[in-house]
Image (cartoon, helix red, strand yellow):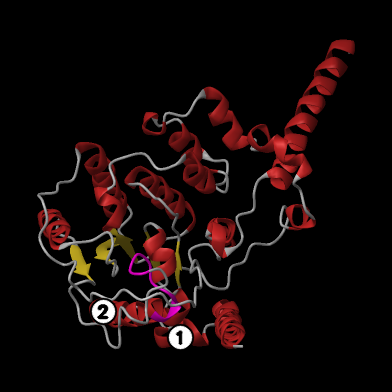
Amino acid sequence: MKKIRIIIYSLLFIFMIIFGLHISSRVFIPKWLDNKDNMHTWISRGFYEEEKNSLDVLFLGNSDVYRGISPIILWDDHGIASYAYTASGQRLWTAYYMLKEALLYQKPKVVVFDVDAVFSNNDSSKANYRKVFDNMKNNKVKYEAINDKIYKFTFEEKISFYFPIIRYHSRYNELTKEDFKYAFYNYHFAYKGLDMVTRIKPYKNGYDYMKKTKEVEISDKVKKYLDGIVKLCKDNNVELIFTELPSATSWNLSKSEVISKYAKENNIKFIDLNKEEIDGFDWMTDTCDGGDHLNVFGAEKVTKYLGKYLTSNYQFTNHKNDTNYKQWILDSKKYHEDKSMKLSKENN
């Protein structure tokens, strides 16, 4: 009997330690909520707040996507539910695991994958990896990801992804009331993954970047995960579309031709928006940083273009009269109110 009590007390003690580490980690983990840090907590945790199997379209990619796609516009125009589940500095190996994670919770008809990162063969920063995996649920996908040798995580780093306080314990003197508030906050994200930026910093040379440069190729390291993304979509009966959002600083014709060849070989549709006529799009008004990323005006125009393409090539249910999607009506209202407020502040 005494041995049983010891075992029970020991298990309770271990449980309390694990619970304490989990709770304290939620407080100590950086929240990455503002535009300066790209709102990663909102984007990642907001994804989990969407109703299970409620999304029709999933957008994947790097920062080009969370600045260049506005899911609310897709809703406004067509009643399509979508989300931009993305990360800055994303590499193909991270995109692969983010897609794998997304498919645990959603069964989209279409995945639109922005291919900008296909030519990024180097490692992203540890900070960018942490913004993804610190906010990913502790499950089999996260376990597989952090143990993938591609990341070169040490044993201590792997443990710290489950209990981030191990990494962030030194933040104790930096904690604010927001760290406590957002530790247990419901992360519903009305913008559905968009980082709404209204500032304008033009790119003045039009489409001069769309020319051939030196020969480029998809490395074996990248191709392994790109093939993995294709297979994940095929295995889950999801239509995969490649796209490249307008990006004057990272794209060119040589890259476009390489992706076109891969897409053709794998029977994948590829929409290079640097070669398409997008109604009203203007590099003088639709970028926030001189051609690297779009602002909200560019994002809305690109999304309208993609909305017409999606509805012309696939059948989607318009959810606007579906009571299960009433939150989307509220989210659309908030999106437009917040956008007006941002513009009003900038004009005053």
- Residue 182 seen in render: yes
| Secondary element at image label 2 | helix
Relative image position of residue 20 (x, y in whole percent):
77, 36
Q: Earlier in the sequence, mark 1 or mark 2?
A: 1
Label 1 to label 2: alpha-carbon separation: 15 Å
Residue drawn at 33 percent across, 62 percent down: 111
**Does residue 22 appear to the left or right of 260 in the view shown?**
right
- The x and y percentages for residue 278 are 26, 82
Q: Are marks 1 and 2 in contact (CB under 8 Å)?
A: no
- In the picture, residue 49 is in which quadrant? bottom right
Q: Is residue 56 visible?
A: no
48 or 220, which is in the foreground? 220
The label number, if any, that marks residue 64 in the structure image = none
Left/right placement of residue 232 relative to residue 133 reads left
Badge 1: residue crowd in 10 Å (few <14, some 14–19, many ≥20): some
The type of residue carrying mark 2 is Tyr
- Check disc 2: other Cα within 10 Å, few if <14, some if 14-19, many if 20+: few
Q: Position of residue 268 (x, y in %)?
A: 18, 60
Q: Which mark is residue 76?
A: 1
Q: Circle 1 sits in a helix, a strand or a loop, which is it?
A: helix
Query: Residue at the location (42% across, 29% down)?
Result: 152
Residue annotated with mark 2: 309
- In the rendered image, the residue lying farthest to the front is 204
Image position of 130 with respect to 339: above or below: above
Image-quadrant location for residue 161: top right
In the image, what residue type sits under mark 1?
Answer: Asp
Q: Which residues are magenta?
A: 290-297
- Residue 292 among magenta residues: yes
Towards the viewer: 208 or 296: 208
Q: Is residue 346 magenta?
A: no
Query: For the C terminus, which image quadrant?
Result: bottom right
